[in-house]
Image (cartoon, grey):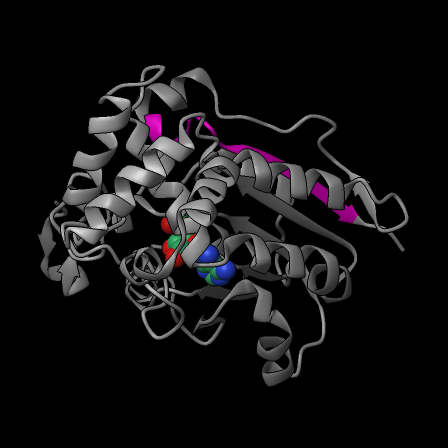
Amino acid sequence: MSVPDSRSGGRRTVHVPVMLREVLQSLSLQPGLWVVDGTVGAGGHSQRILPMIQPGGHLIGLDRDATMLARAEQVVSGENVTLKQTSYSELDAVLDELNHPQVDRVLLDLGLSSDQLADDERGFGFQTEAPLDMRFDARQGESVQELLRRISVEDLTQLLQDFGDESQARRLAEAILWQRDQRQMNTASDLRTCIESVLGSRHKGSHPGTRIFQALRIAVNRELEHLEHFLDDVLPRRLSVGGVAAIITFHSIEDRMVKQAFRDASRWEMLTRKPLVPSPSEVRLNPRCRSAKLRVVRRNP
Ligand SMILES: C[S@@+](CC[C@H](N)C(=O)[O-])C[C@H]1O[C@@H](n2cnc3c(N)ncnc32)[C@H](O)[C@@H]1O
């Protein structure tokens, strides 16, 4: 559970920004730059970026989750800041509205914030009794509960294999849908119990629910589609020549997509030949960052 906090009018942020030092160094920030933080979250990275681009700079913070934007607003605000509830893949519309065609730096820190995970009403965390929702933007798309209501065992098996890397995907899919048919698949806790009954409660040092919940979250939020559109179509047009983009991923499919997109030498100069990863001491302090990979490129002329 997160802790109520009068300063934020809600709950205190528990999220710790990942690879903060590496991100700030990679972005080579200086006064006057326009920076997009496409996954602003609680503003952990942005609150350090904003002072480094003043005077004259502008920070655009985007997030699909209104709750996260409200948190970001507590730490980054003012006339040099634009915060908007939208996907980073909709950056075209944001820049058109600001009448500013290109930006100098882009940061994406993909996936889920610890604040969302700790939210006991959204179903992201398998430790909660919340309804199985997991949408970043509750105004769009279907919840995990709705997905599970209509999905076939074949499609669920495929989803668990592709996004969850689950070797027992068929068995797990059958168990989940059996429980659904008994009308007993409504909450995060129902799903966790089902996962544990098939896979046990520990696998290679972590709970298998971590991967399975992540797979369902990626599916309902169409996370790979947003990333693909951004990498192929939006970023190459909206980042200025000489501009720098830094992307942190937490899933092997996402990292592969970023790596492949950044291989295009006609567009990008790779600034990280191998991805940067968190230091052992960062992983010790914040174990959730252990799968993070940071790739950085500069836009070629
Ligand atoms: C790992 S958190 C970012 C944390 C942030 N860097 C910080 O330090 O506070 C990822 C955030 O991205 C948001 N998100 C996920 N997909 C998104 C998308 N397509 N567009 C915008 N935000 C997205 C999530 O709602 C979440 O708040």
Query: Magenta span has 10?
Result: no
Instruction: From the top left corner, tell me how far across and down residue 103 is, in percent.
Output: 68, 65
Determine if residue 182 is in view: yes
Task: Name the residue at 47% across, 71% down.
Answer: 86
Instruction: From the top left corner, tell me how far across and down residue 57 is, in percent.
Output: 58, 65
Instruction: From the top left corner, tell me how far across and down residue 175 is, in percent.
Output: 27, 38
Decide which of 155, 75 is in the foreground and name it.
155
Q: In which quarter of the image is ligand 1?
A: bottom left
Decide which of 181, 156 is in the foreground and name it.
181
Decide which of 187, 92 is in the foreground and name it.
187
Instruction: From the top left corner, tell me how far across and down residue 187 is, in percent.
Output: 16, 51
Where on the picture, by quarter, is residue 138? bottom left
30 lies left or right of 88? right
Q: Give the range drawn in magenta.
A: 287-298
207 lies left or right of 110? left
Decide which of 105, 146 is in the foreground and name it.
146
Establish if 133 lies above or below 29: below
200 lies left or right of 165? left
Where on the picture, by quarter, is residue 286? top left
Query: Which image quarter is the N terminus in?
Result: top left
16 lies left or right of 91? left
Task: Name the residue at 59% across, 44% down.
Answer: 247
Establish if 125 lies above or below 146: above
Task: Name the residue at 39% across, 22% down.
Answer: 283
Query: Which image quarter is the C terminus in?
Result: bottom right
Task: Name the residue at 33% across, 34% down.
Answer: 172
